[in-house]
Image: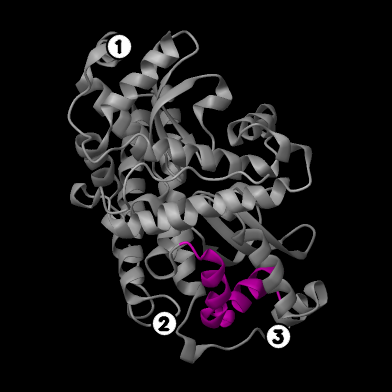
C-alpha cells in the first residue's frame, strides 16, 4: 500500500492575498511535496518499511540516531511540509491567545521575544532548513532551527509551528528576500488556533 | 563584489538574465557584505582578546566568505554558449582516462548533485565539484554543503563548480534541478577549467 499526501487544507490561491501565491503552491505542494512522497514510495516498495502505519513512523525509524538512511530525507520532508501547510490559514496572522500565549510569555519572555527568536532562527539557518516552535522534552516552549529535512520530532520534542526556509518556499514570491518572507509569515499567516490546539495536545 | 566577465544576458537561454542579475547583485553581494561585516567584528573581538566572540563569528565567516569564494570561481567557470569549447589537452586526457569520456564524467557529476534521495547528498543547498586531488593525483567528483569552500575545507583543488542552491536555477527551472544540471554543460568554460587543471598539476 503506497503512502498518500493529505490534501492542502485550503485552495492553492487561498493565501495569495497574504503573500503566498498560487504559483508557489502549485510548485511547493504540487511538485516538491509530491516528489518527496513519490520518491519515498519508490524507496520503500517491497521493503518492511512499506508496512509502517504512517510516514511519521518511517521517518522516526530511518533517522537511525543521527545517521539517517536514504529514506529519511523523503519521509521527513513529507511530514515537515504537511505540518507547514497546517501551520497556516487564510484567516491566520495576528497574535496568539489562550494557553500558548501564556506559555510564550512564561517560557520565551513574551511575544516580541518569540518573534525576534523565530526571525533569527529562520534567517540564520544558512542553507536549506526549517524554523520551529516546539514543546521540549521538559514541557517548555523552545524556538529552534534545523537543516535540510531534520526536525525536532527526531530529537524527542513536539513541534507546534514550523516555517520552511528552503529557497523554493519563497523564491517565486520574494526571490532572495528571505527576511521579508519570514516577517510576512509571522504577521499574516500563522494559524494560532491550530498552534494552540497542538500546544494543548502536547502538554496534556 | 567582482564584476561578471560578461553581461547578465550572456548565459541565456541556459541561465536567464533575471537569474544572473539576482544571483550576482543580490546573493553574491550579500556574501561580500556579510563576510566584510563578520571580519570587521572578528578583528574587533581579536583586538579585545575575546575568544568566545571570535569563535561565535566563525560560522558567519565560513558561510559568507565561502559564498564569496565559490561565486567568484563560478562566474569564471562559465562562458556564453557561443564561446563554448570542449575540454582539450591534459584535462581532456585526464577525463578520458578516468571516466572513459566527457559524458561519463558528466553522468557521475549529475548523479552526485541531482538527487534528493542520494545517500550522501541531502539535496538542500550546496555545490557540485570536479576537482583535483593533489596527493592522489586524480580527478574527483564531490559536493560541499551550503557555502563550504572546497579547497579550504578539503584540500581538493576546484576545477569546475556548479551551484545547486535553488536560487541558482529556480526562477527558470523551478523544481526541475535535473534539467538545469543537464543544460549547464553547454556553458562550461573548459578553457578556464583546463587552465586550473594545468596550474594544479604543474603541467
Label 1: which secondary element: helix
Give the quarter of the image for residue A187.
top left
The mark total stands at 3
Check residue B13 in the rendering and tell me which mark sits there, or answer none.
2
- Where residue A14 sits: x, y (%)? 26, 49
Q: Is mark 2 on a helix, strand or loop?
A: loop
Query: Where the C terminus of chain A falls, by quadrant?
Result: top left
Q: Residue at x 25, y 38 (%)?
A: A189
A7 inside magenta stretch? no
> Is residue A175 visible in this depiction of the protein?
no
The label shown at residue A103 is 1
Task: Please give left or right for residue A191 compared with residue B102 in the image.
Answer: left
The spot of residue B140 in percent (x, y) is 72, 62
Left or right, B91 with respect to A125, comes to right
The region drawn magenta spans: B175-203
Judge by depth and name the residue closer to the eye, B106 or A132: A132
Q: Which residue is drawn at 33% across and 76% down?
A: B17
Q: Residue at label 3?
A: B89
Distance of label 1 from label 3 (alpha carbons): 67 Å
Amino acid at each position: 500500500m503506497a503512502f498518500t499526501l493529505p490534501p492542502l487544507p485550503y485552495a492553492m490561491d487561498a493565501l495569495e492575498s497574504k503573500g503566498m501565491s498560487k504559483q508557489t503552491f502549485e510548485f511547493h505542494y504540487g511538485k516538491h511535496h509530491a516528489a518527496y512522497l513519490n520518491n519515498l514510495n519508490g524507496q520503500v516498495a517491497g521493503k518492511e518499511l512499506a508496512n509502517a502505519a504512517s510516514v511519521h513512523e518511517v521517518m522516526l525509524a530511518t533517522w537511525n540516531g543521527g545517521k539517517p538512511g536514504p529514506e529519511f530525507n523523503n519521509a521527513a520532508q513529507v511530514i515537515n511540509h504537511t505540518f507547514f501547510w497546517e501551520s497556516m490559514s487564510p484567516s491566520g496572522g495576528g497574535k496568539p491567545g489562550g494557553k500558548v500565549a501564556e506559555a510564550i510569555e512564561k517560557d520565551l519572555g513574551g511575544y516580541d521575544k518569540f518573534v525576534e527568536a523565530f526571525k533569527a532562527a529562520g534567517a540564520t539557518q544558512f542553507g536549506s532548513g526549517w524554523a520551529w516552535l516546539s514543546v521540549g522534552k521538559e514541557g517548555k516552549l523552545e524556538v529552534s532551527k534545523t537543516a535540510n529535512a531534520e526536525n525536532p520530532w527526531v530529537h524527542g520534542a513536539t513541534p507546534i509551528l514550523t516555517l520552511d526556509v528552503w529557497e523554493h518556499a519563497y523564491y517565486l514570491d520574494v526571490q532572495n528576500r528571505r527576511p521579508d518572507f519570514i516577517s510576512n509569515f509571522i504577521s499574516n499567516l500563522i494559524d494560532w488556533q491550530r498552534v494552540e490546539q497542538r500546544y494543548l495536545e502536547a502538554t496534556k | 563584489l567582482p564584476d561578471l566577465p560578461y553581461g547578465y544576458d550572456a548565459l541565456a537561454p541556459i541561465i536567464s538574465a533575471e537569474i544572473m542579475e539576482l544571483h550576482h547583485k543580490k546573493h553574491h553581494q550579500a556574501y561580500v557584505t556579510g563576510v566584510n561585516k563578520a571580519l570587521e567584528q572578528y578583528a574587533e573581538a581579536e583586538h579585545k582578546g575575546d575568544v568566545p566572540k571570535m569563535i561565535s563569528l566563525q560560522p558567519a565567516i565560513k558561510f559568507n566568505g565561502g559564498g564569496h569564494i565559490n561565486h567568484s570561481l563560478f562566474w569564471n567557470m562559465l562562458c556564453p554558449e557561443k564561446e563554448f569549447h570542449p575540454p582539450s589537452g591534459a584535462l581532456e586526457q585526464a577525463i578520458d582516462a578516468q571516466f572513459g569520456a566527457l559524458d561519463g564524467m558528466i553522468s557521475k557529476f549529475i548523479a552526485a548533485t541531482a538527487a534528493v534521495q542520494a545517500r550522501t547528498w541531502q539535496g538542500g543547498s550546496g555545490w557540485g565539484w570536479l576537482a583535483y586531488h593533489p596527493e592522489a593525483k586524480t580527478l574527483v567528483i564531490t559536493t560541499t554543503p551550503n557555502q563550504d569552500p572546497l579547497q579550504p575545507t578539503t584540500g581538493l583543488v576546484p576545477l569546475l563548480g556548479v551551484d545547486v542552491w535553488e536560487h541558482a536555477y529556480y526562477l527558470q527551472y523551478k523544481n526541475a534541478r535535473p534539467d538545469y544540471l543537464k543544460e549547464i554543460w553547454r556553458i562550461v568554460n573548459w578553457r578556464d577549467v583546463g587552465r586550473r587543471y594545468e596550474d594544479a598539476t604543474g603541467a
